[in-house]
Image (tube, rainbow, N blue to C red):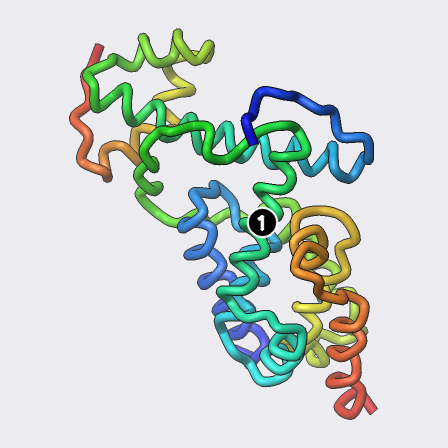
Amino acid sequence: MAAIDEYINTIIERGRRDAHHDGSSTIEAHHLLLAIAAEGENATHQALTSAGLDHRAIRDALDREFEHSLNAAGVSLAASGLPRPSKAAKPPTQLGASAKLALERGFASVDRKKDLRPAHLLLGILQAQVGTVPRALALADVDRAELMARLLRTLTPESD
Amino acid sequence: MSGVEIPVPQEPADALAAVAALRRLADQIEDAAVEQAMRAGWSWPQVAEALGVTRQAVHKKHAKRLIAAGVTLRRR
């Protein structure tokens, strides 16, 4: 198996755990982002760290996005008062729409699959202009365009 | 926030994100409420009727999780 395939499997497997932790029935793009941050591959790790993002910071940003979006509809997270539900028996196996789109965008950024790098997958996630990930990053004051530019620079020497 | 006022978000991006967040919150509350009801001895038909869905739907969505959590489930 090619190194990139192993990487993709690792990210999806780790993303499953984050989705399970969330009580989500699907693996979404933000779970893949959390997985990439946790995995610590060199280029993606450096780019994320330069933007002040590690697994914890991303999770905090996602929590804020959830609360912020609820507040926009006048709903407070503290309102339910119910005990936390037990987790699903097993982590989800299905990729959600946002994760599929992120992977498609990552794959589409190279002509040949052998050129695919972890940074392309992260770029695929960051390319989304609407949805949970860009909203969470904006709330965390992360310059998404700058982060993408930084990632692209890490890819340039190898593609020449 | 009190949760009493229900403003309608003006921006489409905010309104759509609010819908996604409300669905996620509703799922979380459903998981918690169904578990609480089943721990309190409710039956599947009662929970289904209270949620306004079929017994099959509620069973399919929650049974595995509750069994794994060690909740004693009533048959009827």
Position of residue A2 measured from the top left corner of the image (x, y, whole percent): 56, 80
Q: Is the N terminus of chain B in the top left, top right, bottom left or bottom right quadrant? A: top right
The quadrant holding residue A112 is: bottom right
**Residue drawn at point x = 30 percent, y = 27 percent:** B35
A146 and A30: which is toward the camera: A146
**Name of the residue lying farthest toward the front:** B2
Residue B49, placed above or below residue A99 = above
Residue B28, placed above or below residue A129 = above
**Residue drawn at point x = 43 percent, y = 28 percent:** A80
Position of residue B45 measured from the top left corner of the image (x, y, whole percent): 32, 9
Q: Amino acid at mark 1?
A: Arg
**Residue drawn at point x = 38 percent, y = 29 percent:** A81
A142 and A95: which is toward the camera: A142
Q: Is the C terminus of chain B in the top left, top right, bottom left or bottom right quadrant? A: top left
Q: Please give the residue where the numbered disc 1 appears in the rendered image.
A: A64
Instruction: Tell me if B46 is positioned left or right of A115 in this view.
Output: left
For label 1, count other residues whose C-alpha is less than 10 Å away and answer few (under 14), some (14-19) or many (20+). Answer: some
The quadrant holding residue A13 is: bottom left
Query: Which element type, helix, strand or loop, lies under badge 1?
Result: helix
Q: Circle 1 marks a residue in which chain?
A: A
Position of residue A23 measured from the top left corner of the image (x, y, whole percent): 43, 43
**Residue drawn at point x = 80 percent, y = 76 percent:** A149
A1 and A126: which is toward the camera: A126
